[in-house]
Image: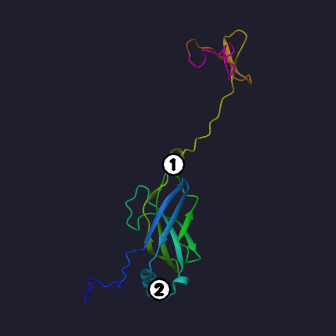
Amino acid sequence: MERQLYNEDWIVSYQRSHMFCLPIHPTCLFAYWFVTDDWRRLCEEHWMCDWSNMPLAICVYDVTGVWFDGHNAPLIRQENIGDTSTTNWYIHNLVPGRHYIVDLAVDRQGELFSLLRSNMVPLPSRAEYGVQPSVTFAAPLSVSANKETVTDLNGVNGQAVISGHPGLRYADQFDGYHLTR
């Protein structure tokens, strides 16, 4: 009779409950999580409530410049989750260039108990994301007949031409779009 060194029927689960956040763009985060059956059962026993009726919420903390210990950062948003089978959430309208941590929490009469906490996520600033600032152009310059003064096309600013000034050096040859000579 051959002896087995291990029991093949024994199933070990290496899964852990976890929550992760990813930046989507400068004002949006994506959070996803996984809750093991053991963790759900523990929560159900603790709050004496079935998981499907658990009052879950997403809590967003701004931890920019803070060594976050779970209590010392402002809770900037709380969104209640109606369907407890949900495993992901988009968080919109955040401030670009800030750092956030997201919790999956139980909300019992306004008291929050964190079940899972995400990684710290820095949102890029708009400039880092490739959003260019708006650019405004001044009206093109036109040169008067005596070439002593330069005015804009609206005729508002009459300025003397300063010799050697790089911006006005080619004012008599440039109409605002191309060289005239």
Determine which quarter of the picture holds residue 141: top right
Q: Position of residue 165 (x, y in %)?
A: 56, 16
Residue 41: percent from the left, percent from the top?
45, 85
Q: Quadrant of the C terminus?
A: top right
Given the image, on which type of amino acid does mark 1 rest? Ser
**Residue 119 image position (x, y, % from top left):** 42, 63
> x, y percentage for residue 8?
34, 83
Q: Determine which quarter of the picture holds residue 144.
A: top right
| Residue at 26 percent of width and 83 percent of height | 5
Residue nearest the viewer, comparing 69 with 181: 181
Give the mark nearer the N terminus: 2 vs 1.
2
What residue sits right under mark 1 in the picture?
A: 125
Quadrant in the picture for the N terminus: bottom left
Which amino acid type corresponds to the residue marked 2 in the rendered image? Glu
Question: Bounds of the magenta span?
Answer: 166-180
Q: Which residue is mark 2?
A: 44
View extreme (front): residue: 1
Residue drawn where x is 54% and y is 68% of the image: 88
Q: Is residue 179 magenta?
A: yes
